Amino acid sequence: MDQNLIIIIGLFFLSVISGMLGLGVAFAAIPFLGFFLPDLVHQVQPLSLLLNGITALFAVFGFSKSGYVDWKKAIILAVVTTVSAPIGSYLAHFVPQIYIWYLYFASVVYLAYRLFKPVKEKSGKENFKLALMLAIPISIFSGFLGVGPGFLLLPTLILLGFDVKMAAGINAFAVTPPSFSAILPHLSTANWNVNLMIPLLIVGAIGSFFGARITSIYIPGSRIKQIFGIVIVIVTLYKIYTLINI
């Protein structure tokens, strides 16, 4: 099978799953694209951030149709994340790529723990001010890794009292603009493959929209969190294997 077709099919699958959580696809796309693209900072990260913005945006459309986006909170949160994310992506240019991978793997461990650990929701007791403060370091760190801030922001919102589906809708909107702003420090050095990028953007948009609609209508958020956790752990473990055997 053609390599580009494998990438497109795999990205569609990851977009559906990430769309279910309103995360944007970058966190899962980083190790997946790393199988095929050798340069983390100049190929994988810029493409993953672009995909993250598109997939998160279409997830917003999916969640908003069911009323799962608090627009006021989402917009305020998006301003904070958008300003903070480019700081991290700029710093990534000065750190050896292997260390970025180490931090990414550590983040996977944390995310898997948060996704599988039951969270007691505190409906009606949302601490939005604390969420805004935590969004700054979260966005800087995620920009450094080349992913959107959603993978840490979503569990943070849930822990701070937001309903799982409402948190996913807010998160999807809040991570869309910082995904694009985090690309800015990469523009002068990014190595784009347009023939691959365009179909990936199309299937990513379609997959994330359907993923958000599936969660909004049919599937409990707790079950989807576990599915996403399993997928990123498997993909990341294989990426670790490939790095060890270079």
Image (cartoon, rainbow, N blue to C red):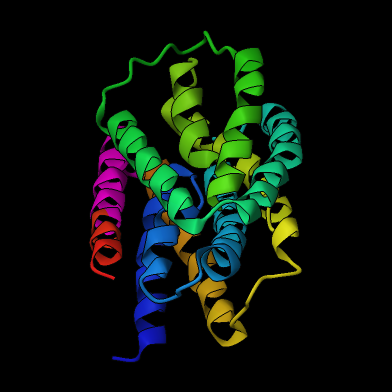
Residue 242 as seen in the image, left or right of residue 165: left
From the top left corner, tell me how far across and down residue 133 is, in percent: 66, 19
Q: Is 225 part of what is drawn in magenta?
A: yes
As drawn, 213 above or below 32: above
Q: Quadrant of residue 229?
A: top left
Task: Using the rendered image of the protein, determine whether residue 221 is visible from the camera's viewpoint.
Answer: no
From the top left corner, tell me how far across and down residue 179 is, in percent: 64, 51
From the top left corner, tell me how far across and down residue 19 is, in percent: 45, 51
Q: Quadrant of residue 191?
A: bottom right
Quadrant showing the C terminus: bottom left
What residue is at 31 percent from the left and 51 percent from the top? Answer: 232
Task: Using the rendered image of the protein, determine whether residue 81 is visible from the camera's viewpoint.
Answer: yes
- The magenta span reads 218-236
What residue is at 74 percent from the left and 66 percent from the top? Answer: 187
Majority secondary structure in the magenta region:
helix
- In depth, the one of 230 and 191 nearer the eye is 191
From the top left corner, tell me how far across and down residue 39 is, in percent: 51, 70
What residue is at 26 percent from the left and 22 percent from the top? Answer: 118
- In depth, the one of 87 and 79 nearer the eye is 87
Q: Residue furthest top?
A: 125
Residue 16 as seen in the image, left or right of residue 43: left
